[in-house]
Image: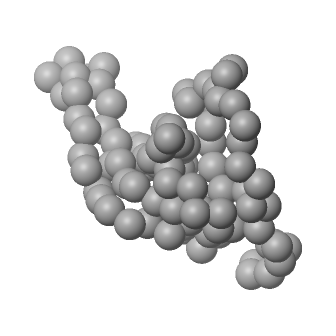
């Protein structure tokens, strides 16, 4: 793996249910600046689509959203906060 990471095989199993899925807590690991999902680097397909709110009162959010695909062919909606370098999983397309 790169940078001491060992991601030799992707987990290609699909989640059976998203019940209990808390998107606010879905921080994705990163490899070389790119988000990982189930051990594989995501391929960013579309984006960024910028969302900014609350700029007028300093209480807003600033995010760049992307459509991505993982090693199993599952399409994901991910975003990166423009205020921190973290990537997040916002949702899984059905």
**Residue 10, how many percent across, how many down?**
77, 68
Q: Residue 32, relative to residue 74: is it above or below?
A: below
Residue found farthest to the bottom:
2
Q: Quadrant of residue 42?
A: bottom right
Q: Is residue 3 visible?
A: yes
Residue 15 at x, y percent in the picture: 72, 42
Is residue 29 visible from the viewing direction of this image?
no
Horizontal side of 71 relative to 39 (left or right) equals left
Where residue 34 sits in the image (x, y, percent)? 54, 66
Q: At x 14% / y 22%, what residue is drawn?
A: 56
Using the image as rendered, state which of residue 94 and residue 38 is in the foreground.
94
The residue lying at 69 percent from left, 31 percent from top is: 17
Quarter where residue 36 is shown: bottom right
| Quarter where residue 44 is shown | bottom left
**Which residue is most to the left?**
56
On screen, residue 83 versus residue 86, left or right, reads left
Residue 57 or residue 77, whichever sits in front: 77
Residue at 79% over, 61% down: 11
Does 23 appear above or below 20? below
Number of numbered discs:
0
Q: Nearer the viewer, residue 44 or 19?
A: 19
* Quarter of the figure that contains the N terminus: bottom right
**Relative to the observer, which residue lies in front, 91 or 33?**
91
Residue beneath the point at 82% across and 73% down:
9
Q: Position of residue 49 (x, y in %)?
A: 25, 50
Left or right of residue 36, residue 63 in this image: left
């Amino acid at each position: 793996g790169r940078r001491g990471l060992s991601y030799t095989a992707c987990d290609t199993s699909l989640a059976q249910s998203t019940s209990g899925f808390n998107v606010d807590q879905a921080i994705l690991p990163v490899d070389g600046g790119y988000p990982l999902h189930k051990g594989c680097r995501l391929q960013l397909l579309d984006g960024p689509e910028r969302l900014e709110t609350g700029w007028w009162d300093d209480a807003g959010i600033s995010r760049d959203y992307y459509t991505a695909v993982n090693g199993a062919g599952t399409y994901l909606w991910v975003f990166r906060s423009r205020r921190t370098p973290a990537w997040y999983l916002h949702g899984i397309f059905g």
